[in-house]
Image: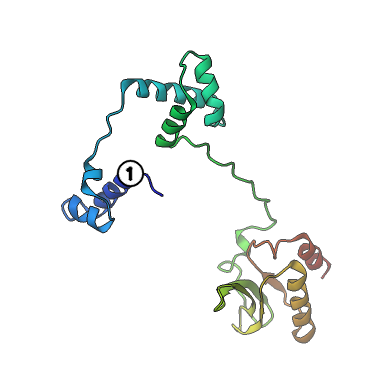
Amino acid sequence: MIDPERRRRTVETVRCRLGHDQVSQRRACQALDQPRGTQRYQAKRPESDKALIAAMRQVTDVRPRFGCERVHPMLNDSGWNVGFGKVHRLWKQEHMQVPQKQRKRRRLPGHSGNGCVRHKATHRNHVWSYDFVTERTEDGRQLKLLVVIDEFTRECLALEPARSFKARDVILTLQYLFAVRGAPEHIRSDNGPEFVAQEIQRWQDAR
């Protein structure tokens, strides 16, 4: 559910990108299913709301990780005497939601010098690549395909389907290929969880 203010901004963004001379407000509203009355409406915000929003922003500038529930009592302590419902409504209108913390990803060994541009395969069994291709079956369930190719010959060495893969499944596929074709000099993959698992890292180090 998109609030009216965001829909108004979306219409104006579309007109700015395509050119106000090329796309009229009426045409943009029709394309985006936005009533023109809603588009032209300008909210008449009381002066008290503007002052309250400014006070809320002062609190969040000092406490950026505080949410609406923790900001409300601090406002009342400073003398505002305002209800939680009003603070919550203004909080949503101003899009003051606290952003989620970004998890730091574990840095993996290696550098761009090992990329496929700088480190090209020059002969058979020089570099293998393996990755997953995702599809869906007729019943809507996800199907994953483990694909292993020789980068020099472009030969598909393995195409293993399964609903899900674990690190052990990847190892078993590689062990089979090593036995029937021989081990490559290098093997390349992305940073998917099945490829950077500690079990695979230990197995590769032991080869």
At x 67%, y 58%, the residue is 110
Residue found farthest to the left = 21
At x 74%, y 82%, the residue is 177
Judge whether 127 appears above or below 42 on screen: below
| Neighbours of disc 1 within 10 Å: few (<14), some (14-19), many (20+) | some
Task: Count every numbered label the image shows and give the total.
Answer: 1
Judge whether 167 appears above or below 92 on screen: below
At x 29%, y 45%, the residue is 8
At x 54%, y 20%, the residue is 74
Question: Would you identify the image quadrant in which residue 173 lies?
Answer: bottom right
Q: Is residue 85 left or right of residue 25?
A: right
Where is mark 1, residue-wise? 4
Residue found farthest to the bottom = 180
Q: Is residue 75 left or right of residue 182?
A: left
**Which is nearer the eye, 16 or 80?**
80
**Which is nearer the eye, 159 or 110?**
159
Residue 24 in view = no
Residue 144 % position (x, y): 62, 73
Judge whether 199 appears above or below 55 on screen: below
Residue 129 % position (x, y): 64, 73
On-image quarter of the C terminus: bottom right
Q: Is residue 142 left or right of residue 38?
A: right
Residue 81 % position (x, y): 47, 16
Question: Would you identify the image quadrant in which residue 69 lies?
Answer: top right
Residue found farthest to the top = 79
